[in-house]
């Protein structure tokens, strides 16, 4: 059963098209990760899905209009959510818990997000990561069947992020349907059963992380750093490119690395380091958004 | 039970949020104190010489109460709405069982208690520091509903401002822009006799507050205090309540739920 169904969503703000014919569905128990650059329309899509903005097209949550769905079934964390700041973390979670008849114990939620030690600190005095974790807890108070999280881990340190990942993974394992937007490709790859890429208001692609990487991730790459002249490329039976002091060798399996270094050493070519990478969701993101990053870190944009 | 539970949760959160803003708390109570100090003690009443204040001290009790009932709820609720908007709190609340009118009622309850306490402080200062007297009668109890309904009305107006104005600064500026003319055009400090006859003071809901409160507090019957079209303080309270109900419904409807 599809918990979220959106068809042909379109939303404009004056001349700006925030959503342009977006259609997607999320099935029960699935984790759907939405990635995209700043201004791609992710937050507008979240608002359209929750009925907190008006958009052309249709949205159904649990088969009904989002504004007609029982609130107990949904948990929303807005992107720039900034709750009352002179309440402690415990009081904030109690406040939102008090809006529902049934739900999870406040102390359990505090422990789940790792806030039990800072539960009595005013929200305004929490660190950025602690604030965000408190907000996530406030979203879980009603034990929702559908969780919609707009960039939940922004500003959280790596340890806190991984703690939230574990929490979300446990929720997903227990059957909670999760729609999550994120800037972190690693997060989408780690958590999502399917990933959608939104760019310029359009859902450019949507599939499992593995399928997207196979389709758009490109080759595995071997980076060889050192001082080379142009003739080094002719030594190797691979597609290569030389950029500053880095030789990039494409489509290299881990087993082939030994023969490549042997070839270089036989030719008397010295190098400083080797780095092998396999394609990941970040490569998919760059490919689909038409961006490339040079060895010097410069971002080049193509017209999509 | 669930509606009461939601109201209790929202009211408790609003109460804590307010009480912990020490500057806001201080000025909420400092405001009536400084008004009494300036106008009641320093300027004082000059009945014979026709100075700034021409009526006996007791006549202005209604005016002082009007100031606290008007200014603080207007700016506080307006600012709270603006804060909720900028922090996406309404977006979050739209997906919870809390209804917009319940949120506004919770804010109103907090303000009724806070302004009630400020009004008690103001009356204590008035009787302690000036020669104001009050008429003791069973009708005096009507001051309580007058204050409560007045606070409710101006909480609603504040919520309207917060919904229609796009920033917290704008809300405060708009609040002042509305409150100051209302104080002077609602018989709070300026008697009807000193204003042009064509001014339709009855269009201001604050007029019904000042007339009604004056009618139950001022020792002497005052023509302008209970004059037409209001026959009795109870009728004034009913009219004020009408304004409050309409204002509350409109404000609850206009509270933002979407972006």
Image (cartoon, coloured by chain):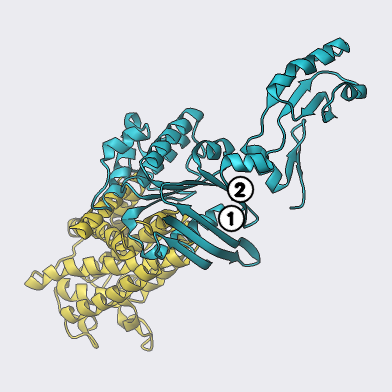
Q: Kindly identify which chain the residue marked by label 2 belongs to.
A: A
Q: Position of residue B230 (x, y in %)?
A: 22, 85
View extreme (left): residue: B138
Residue drawn 8% across the image and 69% down it = B136
Q: Residue at x 32, y 36 (%)?
A: A110
Depicted A128 relative to depicted A199: above or below:
above
Q: Secondary structure at mark 1?
A: loop
For disc 1, the chain is A
Q: Is residue B187 visible?
A: no
- Compared with B186, B69 (above or below) is above
Query: Picture quarter containing residue B250?
Result: bottom left
Query: Of residues A70 and B169, which is closer to you in this image?
Result: A70
Q: Quadrant of residue B171?
A: bottom left
Please state which of residues A196 and A239 is positioned toward the viewer in this rendering.
Answer: A239
- Contact check, label 2 and label 1, Cβ < 8 Å: yes
The quadrant of the image that shows the N terminus of chain B is bottom left
Find residue A78 and report its horizontal and vertical position in percent.
46, 51
Pick whichever, A129 or B82, lies toward us: A129
Q: According to the image, label 2 marks what residue?
A: A36
Say left or right for A178 vs A304: left
Task: Name the spot of residue A174 as percent of width and height, x first.
Answer: 35, 41
Q: Which chain is yellow?
A: B
Q: Is residue B27 above or below residue B209?
A: above
- Label 2 crowding class (10 Å Cα cut-off): few <14, some 14-19, many 20+? many
Circle number at residue A41: 1
Chain A image colour: cyan
Marks 2 and 1 belong to one chain: yes
In the drawing, does residue B144 fall left or right of residue A183? left
């Amino acid at each position: 059963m599809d918990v979220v169904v959106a068809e042909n969503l379109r939303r404009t703000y004056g001349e700006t098209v925030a959503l342009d014919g977006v259609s997607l569905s999320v099935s029960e128990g699935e984790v759907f990760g939405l990635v995209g650059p700043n201004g791609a329309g992710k937050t507008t899509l979240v608002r359209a899905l929750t009925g907190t903005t008006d958009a052309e097209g249709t949205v159904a949550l649990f088969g009904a209009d989002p504004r007609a769905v029982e609130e107990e079934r949904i948990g929303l964390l807005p992107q720039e959510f900034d709750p009352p700041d002179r309440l402690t973390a415990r009081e904030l979670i109690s406040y939102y818990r008090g809006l529902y008849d049934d739900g999870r114990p406040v102390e359990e939620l505090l422990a789940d997000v790792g806030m039990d030690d800072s539960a009595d600190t005013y929200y305004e005095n929490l660190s950025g990561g602690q604030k965000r974790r408190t907000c996530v807890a406030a979203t879980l108070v009603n034990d929702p069947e559908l969780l919609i999280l707009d960039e939940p881990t922004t500003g959280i340190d790596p340890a806190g992020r991984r703690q939230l990942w574990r929490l979300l993974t446990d929720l997903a394992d227990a059957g909670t349907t999760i729609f999550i937007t994120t800037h972190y490709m690693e997060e989408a790859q780690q958590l999502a059963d399917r990933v959608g890429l939104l760019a310029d208001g359009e859902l450019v692609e949507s599939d499992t992380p593995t399928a997207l990487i196979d389709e758009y991730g490109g080759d595995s790459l071997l980076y060889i750093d050192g001082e080379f002249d142009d003739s080094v490329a002719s030594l190797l039976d691979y597609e290569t490119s030389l950029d500053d002091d880095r030789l990039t060798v494409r489509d290299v399996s881990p087993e082939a690395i030994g023969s490549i270094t042997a070839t270089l050493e036989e030719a008397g070519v010295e190098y400083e380091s080797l780095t092998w990478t396999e394609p990941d969701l970040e490569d998919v993101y760059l490919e689909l958004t038409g961006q490339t990053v040079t060895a010097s870190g410069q971002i080049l944009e193509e017209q999509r | 039970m669930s509606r009461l539970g939601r109201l209790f949760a929202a009211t408790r959160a609003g109460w804590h949020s307010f009480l912990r803003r020490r500057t806001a708390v201080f000025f909420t109570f400092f405001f009536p104190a400084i008004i009494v100090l300036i106008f009641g003690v320093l300027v004082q009443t000059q009945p014979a010489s026709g100075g700034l204040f021409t009526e006996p001290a007791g006549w202005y009790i209604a005016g002082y109460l009007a100031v606290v009932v008007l200014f603080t709820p207007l700016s506080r609720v307006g600012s709270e709405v603006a804060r909720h908007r900028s922090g996406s709190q309404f977006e979050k609340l739209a997906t919870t069982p809390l209804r917009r009118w319940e949120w506004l009622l919770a804010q109103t309850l907090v303000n009724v208690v806070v302004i009630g306490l400020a009004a008690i402080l103001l009356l204590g200062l008035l009787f302690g520091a000036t020669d104001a007297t009050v008429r003791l009668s069973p009708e005096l109890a009507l001051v309580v509903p007058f204050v409560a309904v007045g606070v409710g009305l101006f909480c609603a107006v504040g919520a309207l401002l917060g919904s229609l104005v796009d920033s917290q600064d704008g809300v405060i500026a708009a609040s002042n822009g509305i409150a100051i003319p209302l104080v002077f055009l609602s018989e709070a400090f300026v008697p009807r006799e000193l204003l042009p006859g064509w001014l339709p003071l009855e269009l201001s809901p604050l007029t019904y507050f000042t007339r009604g409160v004056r009618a139950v507090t001022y020792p002497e019957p005052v023509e302008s205090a209970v004059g037409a079209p209001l026959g009795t303080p109870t009728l004034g309270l009913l009219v004020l309540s009408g304004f409050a109900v309409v204002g509350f419904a409109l404000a609850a409807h206009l509270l933002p739920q979407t972006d």
